[in-house]
Image (cartoon, helix red, strand yellow):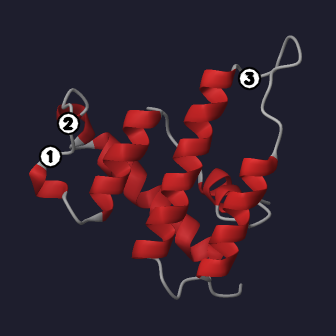
Amino acid sequence: MKPLRAIEVASAELIADDAVMMPRGPGHRLPATVRALRERDRLLREAATRFCEGLSVNGAATKLARGLADYRGTAWRRDCTETSCPQRHRGSLREVCWCILQTRDAPIAARTIRRALGGNGD
């Protein structure tokens, strides 16, 4: 796998912004859901840029998925009711994890993160 570069992360963000995001009938996501997923993906790209420099897309996705799963299974249970990120997490991967889980509290697979980072996801 090739190393993750900032230009690739930025181009993935532009592609996501250009997509048409209106539901077209049953089985399509609501605009609020689409907005939450876009924000989650933006935060994942930010986390990859800050905490996964020099890693491949696959390596970054694995690291972020593991960090999110660890945080969601431990401190998130206590932190989920906070209105802002707890001070003890500031500047760390857990701060971004807190923001991601505030946006959408759901487990995120490495494959989903690869897609958000611009990898193929397969």
Q: Secondary structure at mark 1?
A: loop
Q: Residue at x 48, y 33 (%)?
A: 104
Q: Is residue 49 left or right of residue 41?
A: left
Q: Are marks 1 and 3 in contact (CB under 8 Å)?
A: no
Q: What is the number of callouts on the image?
A: 3
Give the residue number, with chain letter if any, for mark 2. Answer: 79
Q: Are marks 2 and 1 in contact (CB under 8 Å)?
A: yes
Give the residue number, with chain letter if any, for mark 1. Answer: 86
As displayed, is residue 41 above or below residue 120?
Answer: above
As displayed, is residue 122 above or below residue 107?
Answer: below
As displayed, is residue 75 above or below residue 104?
Answer: below
Task: Count neighbours of disc 2 (C-alpha within 10 A) and say few if under 14, some if 14 to 19, many if 20 or more.
Answer: some
Residue 63 in view here: no
Q: Residue at x 24, y 43 (%)?
A: 74
User: Label 2 to label 3, Cα distance in Å?
Assistant: 28 Å
**4 and 106: which is toward the camera:** 4
User: Label 1 to label 3, Cα distance in Å?
Assistant: 31 Å
Q: Residue at x 44, y 59 (%)?
A: 66
Q: Is residue 16 left or right of residue 64?
A: right
Q: Is residue 56 left or right of residue 63?
A: right
**116 and 12: which is toward the camera:** 12
Q: Earlier in the sequence, mark 1 or mark 3?
A: 3
Percent coordinates x, y for residue 81 in the rendering: 21, 26
Q: Amino acid at mark 2?
A: Asp
Q: Nearer the viewer, mark 2 or mark 3?
A: 3
Task: Count neighbours of disc 1 (C-alpha within 10 A) and say few if under 14, some if 14 to 19, many if 20 or more.
Answer: few
Q: Quadrant of the N terminus?
A: bottom right
Percent coordinates x, y for residue 73 in the rendering: 31, 41
User: Label 2 to label 1, Cα distance in Å?
Assistant: 7 Å
Q: Amino acid at mark 1?
A: Pro
Q: Earlier in the sequence, mark 2 or mark 3?
A: 3
